[in-house]
Image (tube, rainbow, N blue to C red):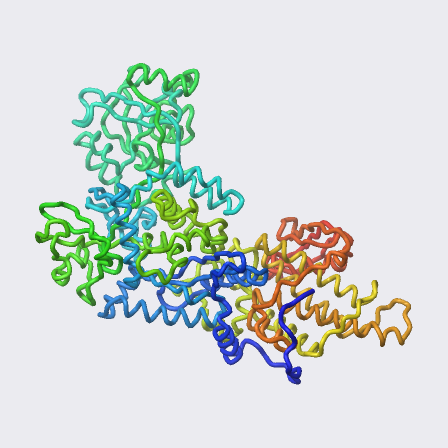
Amino acid sequence: MHTTTEHADRPASATPRRTGTAAVEAKWQRVWADHDLFRARDDGVRPRRYLLTMFPYPSGDLHMGHAEVFALEDVFARYWRLRGYDVMNPVGWDSFGLPAENAAIRRGENPAVFTETNIRTQAATMRRYGVSFDWSRRLETHRPEYYRWTQWLFLRLLENDLAYRATAPVNWCPQDGTVLANEQVIGGRCERCGTEVQQRELTQWFVRTTAYADRLLDDTALLDGAWPARVLTMQRNWIGRSEGARVRIDVRPGSADGPATVAVFTTRPDTLPGVTFLAVAPESPTAAALCVPDRAEALAAYRREALDAGEIARAATGRTPTGVFLGTFVTHPVTGEPLPVWAADYVLPGYGTGVVMGVPAFDERDARFAAVHGLPSGSHETWPSVSEAITRLEAEGRGERATSYRLRDWLVSRQRYWGAPVPVVHCPACGVVPVPDDELPVRLPDLAGADLLPRGRSPLASPAADAWRQVPCPRCGAGAERDPDTLDTFVDSSWYFLRYCSPDAADVPFRRGDVDRWMPAARYVGGGEHAILHLLYSRFVTKVLHDLGYVDPVEPFSALLAQGQVVNRGRGMSKSLGNGVDLGEQLDRYGTDAVRLAMVFAGPPEDDVDWADVAPGSLQRFLARALRLADDVGTAPAGGAPARPGSRAHELRRVVHRTVHDVEDLLERTRFNVVVARVMELVTAARRALDAGPASGDDVEAHDIEAHDVEAHDAAVREAAEVAAILLGLFAPYTAEEMWERLGHAPSVAAARWPAVDAALLGDDVVEAVVQVDGRVRDRLTVPSGIGEDALRAAALATAGVLRTTAGRDVVRVVVRPPRVVNVVTRPRA
């Protein structure tokens, strides 16, 4: 086992010192800063790895969700450095957005004041939390030197026909005074303030994400096995490509004064003989066009109900679909019979044409709708095949082959102040004119308080911003006006990972050489709530910039870890629910290391963490035991005598090397909680060996013990303590640094090398043991094939899965079948 640092000329500490105190944490923060340990060197000496975490929004201090994501991502950063990589682990803030603006209105100040105060607070907590960020690459999206390039990106989209302006029905929040994406509307209400959302026709800026629908979908194949399967499924479903036919169906005379034909997209044109009705999305323009006058009021009321329900609820399987008859009939494309047209909430406006043909004999939702509304079930007859159906439709001039997508173009404009201004001017003579690149950034004017109030339009369209808004046209010089909208914050976060590669670039958003060296990011860590939109937009922007020749990668993130949520007593943390947990209070109470360790030890990263089931106090006690081990081993140099086979020293070395071997695999599989359990086992094994002394139980002479085994024993215990410190440094950096120092090493353990494994000490082959609680698999262990019953029982009971699922229950018995199975039988605690 090898490390890089030498023993320091310091005596061992005579009195154990407690970690977790502010003084100890401040001490190591200074050491890390003084030695600049976490800066990415980018000098080509070592292979590079780019680690990225979803950057936080600066609303108040960090919360428990931040504590989880930072604890998890820092494991990767510290592990990769120990393995010899040049790691880029940058830090920044997604600092534009509504919360800061609303807070500024309440305070009568500019949003920058609130934002920058919170950034300072969060930065201090990040440093206290011991995250090994490269602070030299820090960025904040509200800074003009950043949003200059957000505007540059928008102009590249505009000049390549990937951004456009159009009038469209949008979700409008009257409280926040801005449009909302469909995903920001929950149950018909604004996700931020809870206000009932209205529908308005507004002229807005869109980005043509649909132009990349096929590539966004097809390239998910490049991410299989490296991204969570559920995230890739969500991405694929959101894009929603369907192959089929677009069928033109005649509207019967005497119906509404609408179109003469209706276009219907179907993936099963072969089932046309079984059509019994048409169903239309209630909010689609087609529904209004096909509605007879005396049904218009009923349609309007139903439309509001459908919007209140939200698209996700409407698309859910198993629900009973509702509907309103529009009074219009169309002609059956095969039989010529009249078919009624209904508005139905299970039809979504973004799918196909917003109109579907009801075929109860072949579709479960259509069958439920027909049963509820007394419509015929229809024929089970089909045409020979989908292909032959399409050929027939094309020959008869009634349809053609078509592909439909659920994906809609990205609505990027917002009618609020705190965002990057849209970098165009509106000229009466020239129309929409881009701001020249050399005039970027278009800076925000200095507005505050009442001037920020939403009044049905952007604050940048108010008289307070007249001087800012009125400018000469860049093309003809005549009087013109700046666009009053700002860009959605998703635009800011769609490219920030590229800026991290060249944070000092003054004349370009990023240097291609820097991006090509670091990208794609080796690992992206963040919440599952961003599994669709942020990731989709980031992928889209990367592909666009690749096509325009600015970057080489076609995907931004090679691997993704989408961690679960931190909840309390089974519910999301909320002051109104009385179950909020303050991170700062937890750090004060238990110390940073215990909180970080608790976050990692609570279970697999993708699972939710219920803080009510977490016990930082017990982990605090473990950390103290680890520190006492280092104190008791001290700084005396280790001997070089080999351990006798069968001796305690030899068995301890086998434990050490088996632990490192197993941990390497567990870390690659992100089973961090199991790694913590293995470190606990190692500390326990080292403690027992230290307390027991060198006697091995084999038949050796007393003088042999003194001359040989004492030296080998001391070396084995020191090796175990050093490895424990290195491994613990992945999760509990302050305790690990204290251990490393007390073992006689110069700082820092973060600069050590990953321990080398002696294959000769691995011994038996290893197997995977399944750990069950009441018959359900709760964890897995990698164990030697020859492990005994007692050792397997102890290891299983220490796993995070068992600890989590047995909380509040009594263990009745433990059934052990070495080396493959352990089943823990429990009952509710009386």
Q: Nearest the camera: 7 or 181?
A: 7
Task: Give the left or right position of residue 192, taking residue 618 as reference.
Answer: left
Tell me, yes or no, if residue 175 can be seen here: no
Q: Where is residue 519 in the image (x, y as percent from the top left)?
A: 45, 52
The location of residue 153, given as percent across then percent down, is: 30, 51
Residue plotted at (25% across, 70% down): 107
Residue 402 in the image: above or below residue 217: above
- In the foreground, 468 or 128: 468
User: Residue 330: x, y in percent?
Assistant: 26, 22
**Quadrant of the rendering where the N terminus is positioned:** bottom right
Q: Which residue is at 22% across, 46% downward?
A: 204
Q: Is residue 357 above or below residue 546?
A: above
Q: Quadrant of residue 281?
A: top left
Q: How many marks?
A: 0
237 above or below 116? Answer: above
In the drawing, does residue 55 fall left or right of residue 281? Answer: right
Q: Residue at x 21, y 44 (%)?
A: 165
Pick the residue in front: 559 or 598: 559
State left or right for residue 280 relative to residue 257: right
Q: Can residue 767 be seen in the rendering of this structure?
A: yes
Determine whether 372 is above or below 600 in the image. Answer: above
Q: In which quarter of the image is the C terminus?
A: bottom right
793 or 218, nearer to the observer: 218
Residue 770 spot, x, y in % from top left: 67, 50
User: On the rendered structure, is 626 left or right of 791?
Assistant: left
